[in-house]
Image: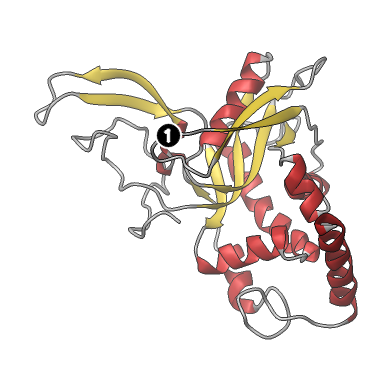
Protein backbone atom coordinates (compact mmCIF):
# COMPACT_ATOMS: atom_id res chain seq x y z
CA UNK A 1 0.00 0.00 0.00
CA UNK A 2 2.89 2.35 0.84
CA UNK A 3 4.51 1.85 -2.57
CA UNK A 4 1.21 2.49 -4.41
CA UNK A 5 0.74 5.69 -2.42
CA UNK A 6 4.28 6.86 -3.21
CA UNK A 7 3.87 6.23 -6.93
CA UNK A 8 0.48 7.96 -6.97
CA UNK A 9 1.93 10.98 -5.18
CA UNK A 10 4.79 11.12 -7.68
CA UNK A 11 2.41 11.02 -10.67
CA UNK A 12 0.25 13.75 -9.12
CA UNK A 13 3.28 15.95 -8.44
CA UNK A 14 4.63 15.51 -11.97
CA UNK A 15 1.24 16.43 -13.43
CA UNK A 16 0.92 19.53 -11.27
CA UNK A 17 4.47 20.64 -12.06
CA UNK A 18 3.58 20.66 -15.75
CA UNK A 19 0.52 22.84 -15.11
CA UNK A 20 1.84 25.38 -12.58
CA UNK A 21 5.17 26.83 -11.54
CA UNK A 22 6.63 25.23 -8.44
CA UNK A 23 9.26 26.45 -6.00
CA UNK A 24 12.89 25.50 -6.44
CA UNK A 25 13.96 22.65 -4.12
CA UNK A 26 16.28 25.11 -2.34
CA UNK A 27 13.20 27.10 -1.25
CA UNK A 28 13.46 29.94 -3.76
CA UNK A 29 10.30 30.95 -5.66
CA UNK A 30 9.67 29.68 -9.22
CA UNK A 31 11.08 28.84 -11.65
CA UNK A 32 12.86 25.63 -10.68
CA UNK A 33 15.79 25.40 -10.70
CA UNK A 34 16.18 29.00 -9.55
CA UNK A 35 18.93 31.23 -11.03
CA UNK A 36 21.28 30.48 -8.13
CA UNK A 37 20.87 26.71 -8.53
CA UNK A 38 21.27 26.98 -12.31
CA UNK A 39 24.48 28.93 -11.77
CA UNK A 40 25.72 26.15 -9.47
CA UNK A 41 24.96 23.50 -12.09
CA UNK A 42 26.75 25.61 -14.70
CA UNK A 43 29.84 26.22 -12.54
CA UNK A 44 31.93 23.91 -14.70
CA UNK A 45 33.11 20.29 -14.55
CA UNK A 46 35.94 19.27 -12.25
CA UNK A 47 38.24 16.28 -11.83
CA UNK A 48 37.54 14.81 -8.40
CA UNK A 49 38.96 11.28 -8.24
CA UNK A 50 41.57 12.43 -5.71
CA UNK A 51 38.78 13.24 -3.23
CA UNK A 52 37.52 9.68 -2.96
CA UNK A 53 39.63 7.11 -1.08
CA UNK A 54 38.00 4.08 -2.72
CA UNK A 55 39.24 5.26 -6.12
CA UNK A 56 42.89 4.96 -5.09
CA UNK A 57 44.99 2.11 -6.46
CA UNK A 58 48.03 1.39 -4.28
CA UNK A 59 51.18 0.89 -6.36
CA UNK A 60 53.79 0.58 -3.62
CA UNK A 61 55.22 2.23 -0.53
CA UNK A 62 57.96 4.68 0.32
CA UNK A 63 59.66 3.11 3.34
CA UNK A 64 62.22 5.90 3.65
CA UNK A 65 59.82 8.84 3.92
CA UNK A 66 60.90 11.31 6.66
CA UNK A 67 57.66 10.88 8.62
CA UNK A 68 57.44 7.12 8.26
CA UNK A 69 56.21 4.64 5.61
CA UNK A 70 53.83 6.15 3.07
CA UNK A 71 51.60 4.38 0.58
CA UNK A 72 52.10 5.38 -3.05
CA UNK A 73 48.95 5.32 -5.15
CA UNK A 74 47.41 6.45 -8.42
CA UNK A 75 43.75 7.00 -9.30
CA UNK A 76 41.85 3.93 -10.42
CA UNK A 77 40.12 5.98 -13.15
CA UNK A 78 39.26 9.59 -13.96
CA UNK A 79 36.14 10.92 -12.24
CA UNK A 80 34.51 14.14 -13.44
CA UNK A 81 31.73 15.88 -11.49
CA UNK A 82 29.36 18.52 -12.80
CA UNK A 83 29.50 20.36 -9.46
CA UNK A 84 30.21 19.96 -5.75
CA UNK A 85 27.80 18.43 -3.28
CA UNK A 86 26.60 21.30 -1.10
CA UNK A 87 23.21 22.23 0.40
CA UNK A 88 21.75 23.44 -2.90
CA UNK A 89 22.94 20.40 -4.83
CA UNK A 90 21.65 18.10 -2.12
CA UNK A 91 18.21 19.74 -2.28
CA UNK A 92 18.11 19.36 -6.08
CA UNK A 93 19.22 15.72 -6.06
CA UNK A 94 16.87 14.66 -3.26
CA UNK A 95 13.90 16.46 -4.83
CA UNK A 96 14.66 14.69 -8.12
CA UNK A 97 15.18 11.25 -6.58
CA UNK A 98 12.80 11.17 -3.63
CA UNK A 99 10.55 14.20 -3.96
CA UNK A 100 8.75 13.38 -7.18
CA UNK A 101 10.43 16.17 -9.16
CA UNK A 102 11.14 14.11 -12.27
CA UNK A 103 11.33 17.20 -14.50
CA UNK A 104 14.63 18.14 -12.84
CA UNK A 105 16.33 15.42 -14.88
CA UNK A 106 16.51 17.84 -17.82
CA UNK A 107 18.66 20.56 -16.16
CA UNK A 108 20.66 17.89 -14.33
CA UNK A 109 21.53 16.07 -17.55
CA UNK A 110 22.37 19.43 -19.16
CA UNK A 111 24.88 20.03 -16.34
CA UNK A 112 26.53 16.69 -17.13
CA UNK A 113 27.19 17.49 -20.80
CA UNK A 114 30.30 19.65 -20.12
CA UNK A 115 31.54 16.95 -17.73
CA UNK A 116 31.15 14.38 -20.52
CA UNK A 117 33.10 16.58 -22.93
CA UNK A 118 35.91 17.09 -20.43
CA UNK A 119 36.20 13.39 -19.62
CA UNK A 120 36.46 12.46 -23.30
CA UNK A 121 38.96 15.25 -23.99
CA UNK A 122 41.23 14.29 -21.08
CA UNK A 123 41.15 10.56 -21.90
CA UNK A 124 41.88 11.05 -25.60
CA UNK A 125 38.38 10.03 -26.72
CA UNK A 126 37.27 13.37 -28.20
CA UNK A 127 36.26 12.82 -31.81
CA UNK A 128 36.32 9.03 -31.47
CA UNK A 129 33.32 6.70 -31.30
CA UNK A 130 31.46 7.59 -28.10
CA UNK A 131 31.82 5.20 -25.18
CA UNK A 132 28.71 3.46 -23.92
CA UNK A 133 27.14 4.98 -20.80
CA UNK A 134 26.56 2.47 -18.02
CA UNK A 135 24.52 3.80 -15.08
CA UNK A 136 24.97 2.31 -11.64
CA UNK A 137 21.78 0.44 -10.69
CA UNK A 138 19.36 1.19 -7.88
CA UNK A 139 17.87 -1.41 -5.60
CA UNK A 140 14.48 -2.88 -6.48
CA UNK A 141 13.01 -1.32 -3.36
CA UNK A 142 14.28 2.14 -4.40
CA UNK A 143 12.92 1.73 -7.94
CA UNK A 144 9.50 0.75 -6.64
CA UNK A 145 9.42 3.59 -4.13
CA UNK A 146 10.50 6.22 -6.65
CA UNK A 147 8.63 4.84 -9.63
CA UNK A 148 11.74 4.50 -11.83
CA UNK A 149 15.50 4.00 -11.84
CA UNK A 150 16.65 7.60 -11.63
CA UNK A 151 20.26 7.05 -12.65
CA UNK A 152 19.15 5.09 -15.71
CA UNK A 153 16.78 7.93 -16.65
CA UNK A 154 19.64 10.41 -16.20
CA UNK A 155 21.77 8.25 -18.50
CA UNK A 156 19.08 8.25 -21.18
CA UNK A 157 18.82 12.05 -21.08
CA UNK A 158 22.60 12.42 -21.24
CA UNK A 159 22.72 9.99 -24.17
CA UNK A 160 20.25 12.15 -26.09
CA UNK A 161 22.51 15.13 -25.53
CA UNK A 162 25.71 13.35 -26.55
CA UNK A 163 24.65 10.77 -29.12
CA UNK A 164 26.04 7.98 -26.96
CA UNK A 165 24.34 4.66 -26.28
CA UNK A 166 23.18 3.40 -22.89
CA UNK A 167 23.54 -0.14 -21.64
CA UNK A 168 22.42 -1.48 -18.27
CA UNK A 169 24.40 -4.68 -17.71
CA UNK A 170 25.18 -4.09 -14.03
CA UNK A 171 23.18 -6.08 -11.52
CA UNK A 172 22.98 -5.13 -7.87
CA UNK A 173 22.69 -7.35 -4.82
CA UNK A 174 22.51 -5.53 -1.49
CA UNK A 175 23.83 -7.31 1.55
CA UNK A 176 23.72 -5.88 5.00
CA UNK A 177 27.11 -5.51 6.66
CA UNK A 178 27.71 -5.41 10.35
CA UNK A 179 30.65 -3.87 12.05
CA UNK A 180 32.18 -0.60 13.13
CA UNK A 181 31.53 2.33 10.81
CA UNK A 182 29.02 0.60 8.55
CA UNK A 183 25.95 0.19 10.73
CA UNK A 184 22.74 0.84 8.89
CA UNK A 185 24.43 0.70 5.51
CA UNK A 186 24.33 -1.85 2.73
CA UNK A 187 27.25 -2.86 0.60
CA UNK A 188 26.81 -2.75 -3.15
CA UNK A 189 27.78 -6.06 -4.67
CA UNK A 190 27.75 -5.58 -8.41
CA UNK A 191 27.90 -8.16 -11.16
CA UNK A 192 27.28 -8.21 -14.90
CA UNK A 193 24.26 -9.53 -16.75
CA UNK A 194 25.08 -12.94 -18.27
CA UNK A 195 25.94 -12.69 -21.96
CA UNK A 196 26.97 -9.02 -21.88
CA UNK A 197 29.45 -8.17 -24.63
CA UNK A 198 31.85 -5.32 -23.86
CA UNK A 199 31.59 -2.55 -26.48
CA UNK A 200 34.70 -1.88 -28.55
CA UNK A 201 34.43 1.83 -27.74
CA UNK A 202 34.67 1.23 -23.98
CA UNK A 203 32.34 2.51 -21.30
CA UNK A 204 31.78 5.48 -19.02
CA UNK A 205 30.18 4.83 -15.65
CA UNK A 206 27.46 7.17 -14.35
CA UNK A 207 26.19 7.80 -10.81
CA UNK A 208 24.37 10.67 -9.13
CA UNK A 209 26.66 11.51 -6.18
CA UNK A 210 30.15 10.30 -5.27
CA UNK A 211 30.98 10.09 -1.57
CA UNK A 212 33.70 7.51 -0.87
CA UNK A 213 33.69 6.16 -4.43
CA UNK A 214 33.10 2.58 -3.26
CA UNK A 215 30.15 1.97 -5.60
CA UNK A 216 32.09 3.28 -8.60
CA UNK A 217 35.04 1.06 -7.69
CA UNK A 218 32.75 -1.97 -7.51
CA UNK A 219 31.25 -1.09 -10.91
CA UNK A 220 34.71 -0.61 -12.41
CA UNK A 221 35.80 -4.00 -11.16
CA UNK A 222 32.68 -5.73 -12.50
CA UNK A 223 33.10 -4.21 -15.98
CA UNK A 224 36.84 -4.95 -16.16
CA UNK A 225 36.38 -8.54 -14.96
CA UNK A 226 33.83 -8.99 -17.76
CA UNK A 227 36.42 -7.85 -20.30
CA UNK A 228 35.33 -4.22 -20.67
CA UNK A 229 37.40 -1.03 -20.76
CA UNK A 230 36.37 1.80 -18.43
CA UNK A 231 37.47 5.25 -19.63
CA UNK A 232 36.22 6.96 -16.49
CA UNK A 233 33.11 7.97 -14.58
CA UNK A 234 30.72 10.89 -14.33
CA UNK A 235 28.69 12.11 -11.36
CA UNK A 236 26.35 15.01 -10.85
CA UNK A 237 28.08 16.00 -7.64
CA UNK A 238 31.13 15.08 -5.60
CA UNK A 239 31.27 15.28 -1.82
CA UNK A 240 34.29 17.08 -0.38
CA UNK A 241 37.08 14.69 0.44
CA UNK A 242 40.24 14.67 2.59
CA UNK A 243 42.78 17.42 2.14
CA UNK A 244 45.14 16.83 -0.81
CA UNK A 245 48.54 15.39 -0.01
CA UNK A 246 47.51 13.44 3.09
CA UNK A 247 47.88 9.69 3.06
CA UNK A 248 45.27 7.38 4.52
CA UNK A 249 47.53 6.87 7.54
CA UNK A 250 47.72 10.64 7.94
CA UNK A 251 51.47 10.67 7.43
CA UNK A 252 53.28 12.21 4.54
CA UNK A 253 52.26 12.78 0.94
CA UNK A 254 50.51 10.42 -1.40
CA UNK A 255 51.91 10.28 -4.93
CA UNK A 256 48.81 10.99 -7.02
CA UNK A 257 49.07 12.60 -10.47
CA UNK A 258 47.97 16.21 -10.31
CA UNK A 259 44.98 17.61 -12.17
CA UNK A 260 43.89 21.26 -12.36
CA UNK A 261 40.97 20.75 -9.98
CA UNK A 262 42.63 18.89 -7.14
CA UNK A 263 41.89 21.62 -4.56
CA UNK A 264 38.87 20.58 -2.52
CA UNK A 265 36.78 22.46 0.03
CA UNK A 266 37.72 22.15 3.65
CA UNK A 267 34.15 21.38 4.73
CA UNK A 268 33.35 17.97 6.12
CA UNK A 269 31.98 15.18 3.96
CA UNK A 270 28.18 15.00 3.94
Which residue appears farthest toward the left when viewing the image? Answer: 66
Vertical order, 60 against 27 (above or below): above
**x, y percent for residue 47:** 49, 45
Vertical order, 70 against 15 (above or below): above
For the N terminus, give its image quadrant.
bottom right
Vertical order, 82 against 133 (above or below): below
**x, y percent for residue 150:** 75, 50
Residue situated in front as seen by the camera: 156 or 146: 146
Residue plotted at (68% across, 37% down):
136
Q: Is residue 245 left or right of residue 125?
A: left
Residue for badge 1: 179
Residue plotted at (46% across, 39% down):
182
Residue 149 in sight in this render? no
Residue plotted at (73% across, 22% down):
192
Residue situated in front as seen by the camera: 42 or 15: 15
Which residue appears farthest toward the front when viewing the image? Answer: 1
Which residue appears farthest toward the bottom when viewing the image? Answer: 29
Q: Quadrant of residue 74?
A: top left
- How many discs appear? 1
**x, y percent for residue 139:** 72, 40
Q: Quadrant of residue 193?
A: top right
Residue situated in front as seen by the camera: 22 or 3: 3
Q: Secondary structure at mark 1?
A: loop
Residue 39 in sight in this render? yes
| Category of crowding for the residue at label 1, using alpha-carbon neighbours closer than 10 angstroms: few (below 14), some (14–19), many (at least 20) | few
**x, y percent for residue 236:** 61, 52
Residue plotted at (90% across, 72% down):
15
Q: How is the image coloured?
A: secondary structure
For the C terminus, give its image quadrant.
bottom left
Q: Is residue 5 left or right of residue 33?
A: right
Amino acid sequence: MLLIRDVARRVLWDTLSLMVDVDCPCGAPPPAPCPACRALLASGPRRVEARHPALEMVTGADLDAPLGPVELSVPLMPLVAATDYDDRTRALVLAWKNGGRAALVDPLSAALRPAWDRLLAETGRAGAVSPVIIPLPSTLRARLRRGEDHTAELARHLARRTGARVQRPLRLHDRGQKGQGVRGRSVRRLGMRPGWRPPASGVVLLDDVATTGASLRAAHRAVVEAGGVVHGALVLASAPGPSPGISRSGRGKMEIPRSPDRTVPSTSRR
